[in-house]
Amino acid sequence: MRLQGKTAIVTGAGSGFGAGIARKFAAEGARVMCADINLDAAQQVAREIGGIAQLVDVGQSDSVNDMAAAALEAFGALDILVNNAGITHLPGLMEDITEEDFDRVLNVNAKSVYLTARALVGHMKGRGTGAILNIASTAGVSPRPRLNWYNASKGWMITATKAMAVELAPFGVRVNALNPVAGETPLLKSFMGEDTPEIRAKFLATIPLGRFSTPEDMGNAACFLCSSEASMVTGVAMEVDGGRCI
């Protein structure tokens, strides 16, 4: 029960890594808001873990502000924020990615971190405590061809994490990131372009441990970084990648 008595928001909690993080947090004693653009999916996970569900578009300021207000009303205070919601564009040459796709990726993967910070950092600073976790990617460390602007958005998240950690450390707020390799999530097919046994085998050959990241892997790592066990850890981008970035 490492998160006993803690409260948390997990964005993108309706599926994939976000659902795994929400389940782990609840199992460790936290009260969790499952926030997602797919409200039905968020409600399903929330029912499963005894949490609450919230509709949110993390790229829109009004929606993020509503999420923050709902969490503070429900919980009274917020201890943990996990910026997990993320999307990608389909693989393609950098000059062929549409402006619409570029804007969508940067809104969800980058602007969301700014919007949630604007909505909730003041609250955490006022309490003198808090943990923020940004879900970045190995793509921000070791970029893959044809995912150029997705790579760039995740590199932005890693730099933002370090900048936030330095600024918020004097206020008792820690900020870290996780860099997963691709996992069995709704985004996997988009990363690979096509989901075939041959393409999966080629992808897995780049991961020394020979498997994809799982929601459970992410939940375990997230729980550590957001718990008091990591009270001296801030500004790190921890790879949960089976050795992909070595």
Image: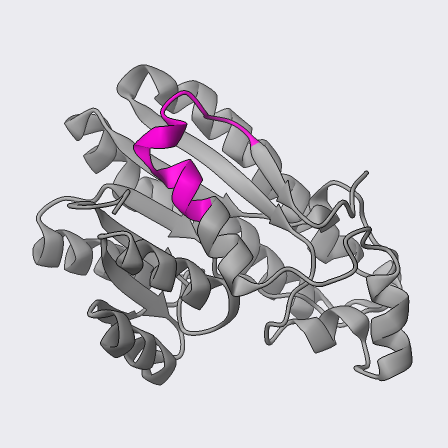
Tell me what residue is drawn at x 84 percent, y 65 percent.
203
Q: Is residue 6 left or right of residue 191?
A: left
Q: Place residue 224 in its image quadrant.
A: top left
| Residue 56 pos. (x, y %) | 34, 68
Tell me what residue is drawn at x 79 percent, y 59 percent.
210
Look at the image and give the residue range highlighted in magenta: 222-236
Tell me what residue is drawn at x 46 percent, y 26 percent.
234
| Res. 49 visible in picture | yes
| Residue 230 pos. (x, y %) | 40, 29
- The figure's colour scheme reads one colour
| Res. 61 visible in picture | no
Q: If the image is split into quadrants, where does the C terminus sit?
A: top right
| Residue 14 pos. (x, y %) | 40, 73
Tell me what residue is drawn at x 39 percent, y 46 percent.
223
User: Relative to 79, does residue 64 appear above or below in the rendering?
Assistant: below
Q: Is residue 14 left or right of residue 78?
A: right
User: Relative to 42, does residue 68 appear above or below in the rendering?
Assistant: above
Q: Is residue 157 left or right of residue 30?
A: right
Q: Nearer the viewer, residue 244 or 85?
A: 244
Please tell me whether residue 114 belongs to the stretch shown in magenta: no
